[in-house]
Structures are given as C-alpha cells and as structure tokens.
Amino acid sequence: MQMASLYIQLLQHDLFRLQLPPLQETNHHNSSNKSKDTNEYTLLIALNHGIRLLTNHISQDLSQGSCILLPTQQSYILQTTKEQADVARFTFLAFQVDKSNLLPSCPPLMLGLPYRLALSTIKLALAGEDWFSPSPLQSNKQNRLHEKHTPAHHSKLAVTQARLQLILGLMNQLENVPTPMQNDQAVQRTVSYMEQHYNEDLTVEFLAEMAGMVRW
C-alpha cells in the first residue's frame, strides 16, 4: 500500500515530559489501551536524546528525532537517562482508501522500528501547534470537553491530522533511501548536518552513527 491511499483519523495528541527519577527509582509512562480497533496506532516522537523505550522487556534507545509506530494495544514504558526529556504522542486510526470505501489498514511502516527525522523537520511539520512546547500540558477535562464541540477545535484537529499524515509520509520516504554512501560522502553529509543543525542537542554517538564510523 502506498501512502497516497492512506487516510488517518486523529484521535488524540499530547506531550510527555520525562524526568530522571531520584535514587535509581523507575520513572515511566505506561500505556495499556484496550482498544478493540486493530487499525489503531500510536506514534511516539523523541524530541530529545536520552530516551529509552521498553516493549515486551526489550529496551531500545531513541535519539532526538526518532519516530516509532506502535499498535495501540502494545504496552510500553518510557524512561530518560537525562534530567528531563520530551516525547510527543499521536493516537490515530488508519484506513486504506478504496474508491469510496475506507478499509482498516496498517501504515506502510515497520512497527517498532525507529525512523529518524531531523528535529527541524519535525518542528516545521508541526509548526503552529501550541501544544508543541517545552513544558508539559496541563490537562483540564472540562475545558477539553467544551473545546471538542467548537468549530475552532474541529478546524485545528483537521490541520493537526494533516501534519501527522505528513510526518508519516516522511517516515515512509526513509524506506526508499538508497544504499549507504561511501565513507567520504557520509562524513561530508555529517559535517553538513552539523552546520545546519548546530543549535540542536547533537552527540558524538549520533554523529558517528550518521558517518558510519565508530565513536572513537
């Protein structure tokens, strides 16, 4: 299935702020949604380095800009190795457009596999979202229930849904990336990335991986 035939229905989106727990205690966020929709998915976007995702007792470190798609029924734990780190989350239904019908479907992406996008690209795709901020959302159920019935809310939801579809499309483009470049080209690409993203939280490990070299 191609992304062009994919239609998504955004259910909710929010922002988590993870904090390093004191005294080695586990600080995490659990998701145990019991949705019966097999075409419901959760997209997690790491907005900082130092984020760890645990699924089925398997741990993987997410770097800044990592986007990972999980079925909503999948329970997971998020931790951070830094003092604090932010994770954006989208929950949505996915359908395949077949003429005038919408058929439950899975996005053409590998579930549980991190796709890395530049943080600047993610911010550009989500530009204008007032929830995309360095501080966590303050949930107010009464206000949210009221907002759900306003035209402005429906309009904003449609815009956010389109932006989510854009991010999924960018992730899908990474599936068609050509074979790895030669070493000198990879190093040059890494240098160019540093020049363009100097204001981001870059690490030696991230740059070494991009250049196809060991850390040393």
Image: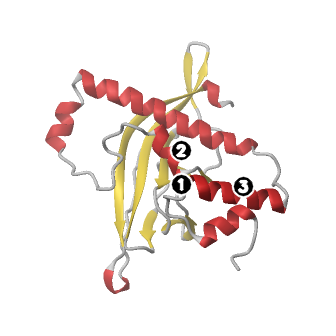
Q: CA distance from mark 3 to mark 2?
A: 17 Å
Residue 114 visible in the shown view:
no
Q: Could you tell me the amino acid type at mark 2?
A: Thr
Query: Label 3, on which residue?
Result: 189
Earlier sequence position, callout 2 versus callout 1 = 1
- Name of the residue lying farthest toward the left: 142
Q: Give residue 84's position: percent from left, percent from top.
A: 37, 68
Query: Label 2, on which residue?
Result: 121
Work out whether 186 lies above or below 140. below
- Say left or right for 135 vs 11: left
Q: Residue, x 44% and y 32% (percent of image)?
A: 161
The 10 Å Cα crowd at callout 1, few under 14, some 14 to 19, many 20 or more, is many
Badge 3 element:
helix
Q: Could you tell me the amino acid type at mark 3?
A: Arg
Earlier sequence position, callout 1 versus callout 3 = 1
Q: Quadrant of the N terminus?
A: top right
Query: Label 1, on which residue?
Result: 65
Q: Give residue 138's position: percent from left, percent from top.
A: 21, 51
Structure colour scheme: secondary structure
Q: Residue, x 57% and y 69% (percent of image)?
A: 203
